[in-house]
Amino acid sequence: MRRNKWRGTILFVVILTVMGLTVGLRLYGAGQPTASSHAVSLPPSASPSASATPSASAPAASAAPAATPSPSAAPVAAAKKVDGAVEQTPYGPIQVELTYTGTRITAVTELQAPNDRGRSVEINAQAGPILEQEVLSSQSAKIDTVSGATYTSDGYAQSVQSAIDKS
């Protein structure tokens, strides 16, 4: 009975994660709540005051709003990939790769995950997306442990930290 309860909870978390919602599971109060900032700032030439005020040297009748640069014209930071260390867990190795754009972690890829047993594959399939979202939202290795995937969570966090240390 208790086992089915956890399966339902894990399935619910996976469904929420797939739908794009960030879900942080906490085990024994590990870690602090994470928050993600999605603030967008406009370049100075795109601010309302820059395009609404005509310059003093141009006649008012012929003043056209300043052209805003297209998104493709803005310089794009090259993506840099950094592999974390291979961390051994009781069920097998785990290793991640971080993709940086500038100084921000923009992607986390599992290069290795425990797969020696069917149950290990099942646990990692459920925990992997949650741990990835935790890293992306916290921008660090200080992530919450996923209930039922403690070893995977610990190894994942250690591999992330080693990649951060390398970058």
Image (spheres, helix red, strand yellow):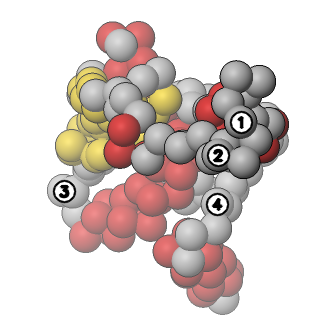
Mark 1 lies on a secondary structure that is loop
Mark-to-mark CA distance, 1 and 3: 75 Å
- What label sits on residue 22 in the rendered view? 4
- Residue 107, given in percent of the width and then of the height, sits at 38, 43
Q: Nearer the viewer, mark 1 or mark 3?
A: 1
Q: Real-space Cα distance between discs 1 and 4?
A: 52 Å
| Residue at 25%, 70% in the rendered image | 118
Dots 1, 4 in contact, CB < 8 A: no
- Mark 1 and mark 2 in contact? Answer it, CB < 8 Å: yes
Q: Quadrant of the C terminus?
A: top left
Mark 1 or 4, nearer chain start: 4
Is residue 134 in view from this perspective? yes
Report if residue 156 is visible in the image: no
61 with respect to 166 (left or right): right
The residue labelled by disc 3 is 116
Residue 39 image-quadrant placement: top right
Q: State the residue at coordinates (49%, 29%).
A: 104
In terms of secondary structure, where does tag 2 sit? loop
- Mark 4 residue element: loop
- Tell me the quadrant of the picture where the N terminus can be found: bottom right
Q: Nearer the viewer, residue 93 or 46?
A: 46
